[in-house]
Structure formats: C-alpha cells, structure tokens
Image (tube, rainbow, N blue to C red):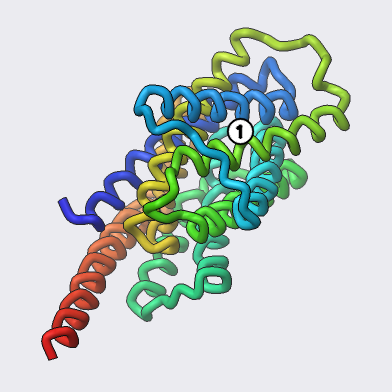
Amino acid sequence: MSNIQKGHLFNMISVLMLAVGPLLSKFGLLQISPSKAALINVLTIIAACVLLGLFTKNYVKFYFEKNIILLAVFNSLGIIFLFLSIDLLSPVEIGFLGRFYTVFAVILSVFFLNENLSRKELFFITFAVLGTFLFVDTGGDYTNNLVGSLFALLYTFFFALTNIFIKKTLSKQKSSNSIMFTNNSISLLIIIIYTLIMGELFYGDYSFEGIGYLVLSTLLGGFLGTLLLYEALKYLRFSIANVTRAFSPLLLAVISYPFFPIEITVKNTLGAIILILSILLLSTGDKKEKADEKTKVTSKSAK
C-alpha cells in the first residue's frame, strides 16, 4: 500500500468515526449542559492519550511550542461552539452546516500553508461543495435557530483553523498522540475557565448516562477519529484530506435517520451522487499528480 493510499484509508475511517459523534453527543446533551460536555470531551481525550501511550509504550510528551499553543486556543473555541450548536440544533442540521468546514479548510490552506490548487482540483472541489449543498437541501428552515447556526459555522471555522496548525506542527519526529495530548491539556485549562465563568463547574448535575454518551462520542470522534486524521495528514495534502471529509454529512444523515428523519428529494439524491463522484475523482487526481511529481524529480536526478 502506497503512502497516498494509507492517507486516504486513515482519512475515510476517521470520517466514519466522526459521523456518529454528533448523534451520541446530542443524546448526552439532553442530560448535561454544553460547558460540562466540553469539559468531559477534553478530559476523555487526555485520558485516552495517556492510556494509548502506556499501551504502546510510546509515552506522551508535552510539546510547549507557539503553534501548538495557538492550535489549543482554536481547538478550545471549536469545542465550546460545537457543543453549544449541538445543544440548539439536531444532529442532522449539525452535519449539514458542518459542510462549511470543507470550505474553510480549503480557503485557509491556501493562506496559511501556501498550498496551490490546480484547475482540475479546484473544479472537483467546487463540485464537491456544490454536491454537498444540493444534498443538504431537504426543505428544512435553518433560520429557525440563527444562534445555533452561527455557533455551528464558528465551530467549523475554528476546527479548520486548528487542523491548519496541526498540519504545521506535524513531523515524523513528533508523535500524533503527544500532539493531541498537549493540545487537549492546554484546552482543558481554557475550558475550565469557561465553565467557571458559566457557573457550572461545581454544579453537581452530572448524569452517568449523559456522561456515557459523551465519553463514547469523544472516543470515536474526538480521539480515534482525530488521531487517524493526524496520521492521514502525514501522507495527504491538507486541502485534499479535508474535501474527502465532505462524506461526513451524508453518513451522519444515514445514521441519524431513524431518530431524526429527513426528506429524500431529487436534489439531495443528485447532490450525494455529485459529492461521491467528485471526491473519488479528486482522490484519483491527487495520486496521479504525486506520481507525476515523483517522475519529474527522478528525471531531473538522472540528468
């Protein structure tokens, strides 16, 4: 298996795990406040990182670096706005509005990572976003909760910004697990301050069932899903990896359908087809471009 294939495999498994997260989180938020949910989220990830380090004997390290501190700040804001939006919206709406993550990720990668997009890639990315917009056009009125929609857009923006800085800090010398540990350890301090401001840190209304849903959601999406994304970013360009993640709203809609049914229309069916084809063609194009670049380098070396 080539490095590009590894990257796409890690990315797709990550997408599967992230798709189920909002549904489990919604069940948890029926019993626990958003600020406590954010706190449970980071504590679960920190514990999982430590346990993974012990299990693999690759113990976690704390990386005190400027970029990691910045990504922790953005991560904290993303987590806070995520749970605020899930509390106000349905999981299906969260998945739909989460499509803007792809738009933010592609735009930010051009500005912060100096990634260049070919015309072919731009074409496929445009159609992937178009397909997502068509798919989510289910006739629902998202203006019913403007605050929740705003929070959803903010969380997608801050998570895209977080992953930009993750890409800048990743290297073969640094453990993905340790980066996640450092990120969430710093985020924990910020979220504790947020929970204190909200006056809920010492309020004893912690439902065990709610905690169970949130811990499971965090382990699948926040921990394993994110860890696999980190690994995928070692082999894939940031913009390519994140366009592939446009599958997430489609998967979330399927998983959430028994609990939150959505209307099946010609538009969203057509959108799903366009989305899948665009992503497959984009992935294939990325492999060919990498192969062409390798051939050019080999040819220059031979000369």
Instruction: Say above or below: 271 vs 44.
Output: below
Whether residue 123 appears in this view of the structure is: yes
Nearer to us in this view, 118 or 277: 118
Quick one: label 1, few (<14), some, or many (20+) residues within 10 Å? some
Image coordinates for residue 110, horizontal then vertical, percent: 52, 72
Relative placement, left or right, of 130 versus 111 is left
Please name the residue shown 67% across and 19% down the image: 30
Nearer to us in this view, 26 or 106: 106
Relative placement, left or right, of 158 versus 272 is right
Q: Which residue is mark 1?
A: 90
Please name the residue shown 56% across and 29% down the image: 46
* Labels in figure, total: 1
Report which quarter residue 204 is drawn in: top right
Image coordinates for residue 113, horizontal then vertical, percent: 51, 69
Image coordinates for residue 287, horizontal then vertical, percent: 23, 65
Nearer to us in this view, 172 or 188: 172
Give, as a three-letter code, the residue at label 1: Ser
Instruction: Say above or below: 116 vs 149.
Output: below
Please name the residue shown 37% across and 47% down the image: 231
Whether residue 93 appears in this view of the structure is: no
Instruction: Say above or below: 259 vs 265.
Output: above
Report which quarter residue 55 is drawn in: top left
Please name the residue shown 54% across and 32% down the image: 22
